């Protein structure tokens, strides 16, 4: 097929889903050439993740607070651009409206494997016929244009000013005085994807002692309490010089820049996990109510997934829940600290 000269990609949210678009954007840009237009539509709060992307021409930001009126205005803007191709990687009600408004000559939509997902969550029947990650499923949408994966993993583009500022903060930590740097990300948007913070604290303390490591804590505003708990435990048991807490202090791009200083990152199944993968960090990931079949395992980097594969109630969701439907959260509470530390040791 003839490659388009003007394309728009729709992926409104969230952190991990947007970071996972980076391989598609890279191979698509390589195919269409530097003079073609490749635009992106994203929610305003996540725009930093793609704003500096070298493979994009224009980033359209959607402000959820603007409501339906804002969505209609965005639809009008997109229609005026006269795109030849719409790549819908979200397939939500909003993106259905936007892609229809574009009136493009061709529209391709990501196959979310909704039936397979429903069968696995509700009937515990694994009907997945492949092991493709979400990043690979994104590329699948444009295969008819002869575009294939380059297997180079994820990317995140960070402005030089941000890299410089973060490097300055890292220099003050004197990381060269430590044998290793361990990143700890104890948060996640959903309760059923959060390993207990007491166990993250134990991993952090043992890592500080056993590996003579500096522990760096990452998280957003909602994770400040959990990160503060881990920080206090490390200070109490390993000394104040063994930990630095950046929860609520760093933006997404600043967190990504700082994660690059880590030798190993211990994390829940979260957006920060994908940012760490984009910086090609070694990752130990805790998976609770979700499973790798959904396509969100760390992509393009060395990783170990720690999960309780013996439970017949797992997975209970494909995105996470506010509470465990069984009331026990065994998918996470039965994951021992020793198993995580063993994975960290194997990577170090």
Image (tube, grey):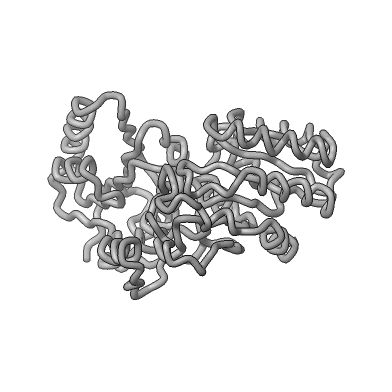
Instruction: Give the residue drawn at x 60%, y 44%.
Output: 186
Instruction: Residue 254: give x, y in percent of width and height.
Output: 59, 35
Residue at far front of view: 327
Instruction: Give the residue drawn at x 22%, y 40%.
Output: 94
Instruction: Residue 167: give x, y in percent of width and height.
Output: 70, 36
Query: For this view, does 119 lie left or right of residue 198?
Result: left
Residue at far bottom of view: 129
Query: For this view, does 96 lie left or right of residue 113?
Result: left
Out of 79 and 271, give the one closest to the viewer.
271
**Occupied quadrant, residue 241:** top right
Instruction: Give the residue drawn at x 41%, y 71%.
Output: 131
Out of 80 and 294, give the one closest to the viewer.
294
Whether 19 is drawn above or below 24: the answer is above
Q: How many marks?
A: 0
Instruction: Residue 122: give x, y in percent of width and height.
Output: 31, 62
Query: For this view, does 312 lie left or right of residue 211?
Result: left
Q: Quick check: can you spot residue 318?
A: yes
Quarter of the C terminus within the rendering = bottom right
Instruction: Residue 274: give x, y in percent of width and height.
Output: 52, 51
Out of 243 and 50, give the one closest to the viewer.
243
Q: Quick check: can you spot residue 161?
A: no
Quarter of the N terminus within the rendering = bottom left
**Occupied quadrant, residue 111:** bottom left
Instruction: Give the residue drawn at x 39%, y 44%.
Output: 56
Whether 237 is drawn above or below 131: the answer is above
């Amino acid at each position: 097929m003839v490659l388009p000269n003007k394309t728009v990609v729709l992926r409104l949210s969230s952190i991990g889903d947007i970071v996972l678009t980076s391989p598609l954007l890279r191979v698509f840009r390589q195919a269409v050439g530097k003079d073609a237009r490749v635009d992106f539509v994203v929610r305003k709060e996540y725009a930093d993740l793609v704003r500096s992307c070298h493979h994009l021409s224009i980033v359209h930001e959607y402000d959820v607070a603007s409501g339906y009126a804002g969505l209609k205005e965005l639809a009008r803007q997109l229609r005026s651009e006269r795109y030849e191709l719409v790549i819908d990687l979200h397939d939500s009600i909003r993106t259905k409206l936007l892609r229809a408004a574009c009136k493009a000559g061709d529209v391709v939509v990501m196959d979310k494997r909704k039936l397979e997902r429903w069968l696995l969550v509700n009937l515990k029947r694994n009907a997945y016929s492949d092991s493709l990650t979400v990043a690979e499923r994104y590329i699948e949408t444009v295969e008819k244009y002869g575009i294939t994966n380059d297997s180079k993993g994820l990317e995140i583009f960070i402005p030089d000013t941000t890299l410089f500022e973060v490097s300055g903060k890292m220099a003050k930590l004197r990381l060269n005085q430590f044998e290793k740097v361990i990143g700890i990300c104890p948060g996640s948007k959903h309760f059923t994807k959060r390993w207990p913070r007491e166990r993250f604290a134990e991993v952090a303390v043992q890592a500080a002692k056993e590996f003579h490591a500096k522990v760096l804590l990452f998280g957003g505003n909602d994770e400040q309490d959990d990160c503060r708990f881990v920080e206090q435990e490390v200070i109490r048991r390993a000394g104040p010089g063994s930990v630095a807490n950046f929860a609520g202090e760093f933006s997404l791009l600043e967190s990504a820049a700082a994660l690059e200083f880590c030798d190993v990152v211990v994390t829940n199944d979260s957006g920060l996990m994908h940012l760490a993968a984009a910086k090609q960090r070694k990752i130990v990931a805790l998976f609770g109510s979700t499973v790798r079949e959904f396509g969100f395992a760390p992509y393009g980097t060395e990783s170990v997934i720690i999960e309780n594969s013996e439970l017949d109630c797992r997975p209970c969701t494909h995105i996470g829940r506010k509470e465990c439907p069984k009331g026990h959260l065994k998918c996470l509470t039965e994951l021992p600290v020793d198993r995580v530390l063993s994975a960290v040791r194997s990577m170090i």
